[in-house]
Amino acid sequence: MRVWFITGASRGFGALITAEALAAGDAVVATAREPKSITDKFGEHPRLLAARLDVTQEAQAQAAVEAAIQRFGRIDILVNNAGYGLLGAVEEASSRDVERVFATNVFGLLAVTRAVLPQMRRQRSGHVINMSSLGGYGSYPGWGVYCSTKFAVEGLTEALAVEVAPLGIKATIVEPGFFRTDFLDGQSLSVAEPISDYADTAGATRTRAAELNHAQPGDPARLAKAILTLADASKPPLRLPLGSDTLARIEAKNRGVAEELASWRELSLSTDGVHAAN
């Protein structure tokens, strides 16, 4: 029986992954700001621990991990799922908007990871699964600040994967595309005050987001099953894109980067110094 530690488990991907893990016979430490939201959804279960966790409160992360170890003795899989979105042009996002989204999506993820890793190091085993986004690989107008948090998650995870590999611990970035969750609802998304000059860029993204809400192509239940498959892998990938839209975005960006490298290659190489012969 594996033990999962899942943040943001009261709804969306977190709740679905919790349900799949329980159905697979695993134990789950399901965390949320209000633990009652977990028990209301799943009821009392011998393999379920509902723990209070606002990821922006590092002391709560430490307490939740201690409770997990006391109840189950180990943590095998950490799913850093808690997060929310910010929709608005870079200039439209206020300092408060930016601080709040980074506090949850980046600093909160770091706080939970720091709390869990000592136990995984003691075990010499574990798998850290960090939920990113297709916006963690390529940014979009209107999503710049949100995407920057996911770029940060990807950079952190790339380094983490190398650092923990000798300790028997794995790390994976999961990049979902647009899935039919409540992410585009007010509960999961903050929208910045618009500036008219950005109507054709960030404004168009706002309109598209409203039209796409609950009509996204991805099936959340299938994503949850995919996370279970990922957890079963003996050699998991560093990145796992999920959804045809994510694959298309990655392929398009890779082509664009390759073309730009070729176009500017001469100037790029010109900055190397000339070394005098000994």
Image (tube, helix red, strand yellow):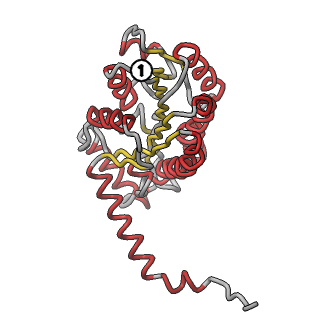
Residue 153 pos. (x, y %): 52, 47
Residue in front for this viewpoint, 187 or 119: 119
Location of the C terminus by quadrant is bottom right
**Residue 67 higher or lower than 262, as above or below:** above
- Name the residue at the right extreme: 278
Q: Quadrant of residue 58?
A: top right
Residue at (61% x, 19% y) in the render: 66
- Residue placed under numbered mark 1 in the picture: 1
Residue 108 pos. (x, y %): 57, 35
Location of the N terminus by quadrant is top left
Residue 79 pos. (x, y %): 46, 33
Residue in front for this viewpoint, 245 or 277: 277
Left or right: residue 141 versus residue 274 is left
Mark 1 residue type:
Met
Residue at (47% x, 15% y) in the render: 49
Residue at (38% x, 58% y) in the render: 199
Residue at (47% x, 54% y) in the render: 144
